[in-house]
Image: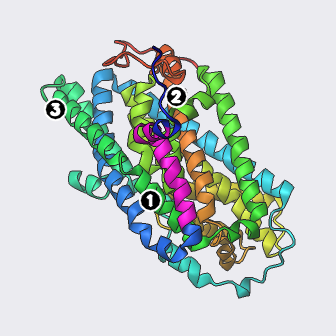
Amino acid sequence: MPPSVPSLPRRVARILRTSLFAQVACALVLGIVVGKLWPGVATDLQPLGDGFTRLIKTIISPLVFCVVVVGIAKAGDLKAFGRIGLKALIWFEVASTLALVIGLLAANVVQPGAGMNVDPATLDTAAVDAKTGGGSLPSTTEFVVNALPTSFIGAFAENSLLQVLILACLVGAALLHLGHTRVLPAIEQAQEVIFAIVGFVMRLAPIAVFGAMAVLIGNYGLGVIETYAKLIILCYTAAAFFIALLAVALRLVTGLSLWKFLRYIREEMLLALGTASTEAVMPRVMQKLRRAGARDDAVGLVLPTGYSFNLDGASLYLSIGTLFIAQAVGVDLTPGQQITVVLVLMLTSKGMAGIPGSAFLALSATASSLGAIPAGAVALLLGVDRIMDSMRVVTNLLGNCVAVFAVSRWEGALDLDRAKRVLSGEGVAEGEETPVPEETAPVAP
């Protein structure tokens, strides 16, 4: 007698019960519906998304610390770790500069702000001050100095990833000098505990996505998409083009498929889209990159550093946004001024991570440096900024993940066979670890 086939409702119920992707997708749709039909109720759901993000943030710093310390200690080569960091910074600078240039070219061709003829005097600049909290972006010197920890506990308490990375490097180097001692197994066990906590917290992801999406639609509605349609379409198209370049780069450097990687992290990508936060998925993405064959020290250094140095999506948005507001107020920027835009944004975009309203602060700083665009014109982007979060989140996250694979491959810290198996859905044996060679020979780019 042939086995009975479960009914459609039972199959759907099983998928919803077992698949985080399906749960988050349903929460996303439900959040849009609630935000559209009951905007007053939707705005009260802010704590759902904020609470989830706070829980994730509590484990990011200790997780990064453990992964980096274990990675350095197991790799047994501090010089190799330094090479990984240097190659990562070079990759980040090239990628973010390319994103800025693509944004400028796209804005020059499409002219999203042309014909708006906005009078800057009519704009509410106080709203920009409220968005940024009256803050400012740090100078290059301040950014470097602030990356140095003032206390061991303070780095974790303030959730400063760059400070935590420096501490982790020092501890990892000390363990190498002392011969690991009995501290390393304790740190490895702490790492496993943190990953277990990540698993618990991720069960709340659908609730967080529902709340965040309901608040977005409830506050801004869908009408803003019609008002800024040309700008929105341009930004998303430019991001798609940049991601296509990332796919080509990943294929050339590693032979891996970005599409397969997208399928591999589809749950995390959907969660990042729903919460408009790459931090919300950072622990899970680190775990999946390690499982896909990237060595601990590469993952632990490149991915967290990318959160501060490799904001490709933000770079695209900033360059397009600068030309948009210039065109909207009738200012024709010369080629020299546009080059200045790139140079200024190359600096300001590096200090954006973790600062409220950082995009507006960067745009204001760029407008002030040009002297041709009224700083108040930045208020034109207030209504559309939140809609751009999805583009920025996806591009930033993929840019950093591709950087992990590329730098790992160049440094010989990537198990390519394992990566291909995992991304193809074949999986790996239970307990199988990414091998750490005794002597790692860098792979020439």
Q: Earlier in the sequence, mark 3 or mark 2?
A: 3
Three-letter code, disc 3: Ala
Magenta part mainly helix, strand or loop? helix
Left-right relation of 33 to 73: right
Q: Label 3: which residue?
A: 186
Give the residue drawn at x 43%, y 50%: 279
Task: Verify whether residue 21 appears in magenta.
Answer: yes
Left-right relation of 175 to 25: left
Q: Quadrant of the N terminus?
A: top left
In the rendered view, tell whether residue 52 sits above or below residue 376.
above
Q: Label 2: which residue?
A: 405
Task: Verify whether residue 241 appears in magenta.
Answer: no
Left-right relation of 228 to 278: right
Q: Tell me, for residue 354, which label it has, or none.
A: 1
In the rendered view, tell whether residue 119 sits above or below residue 265.
below
Element at badge 2?
A: helix
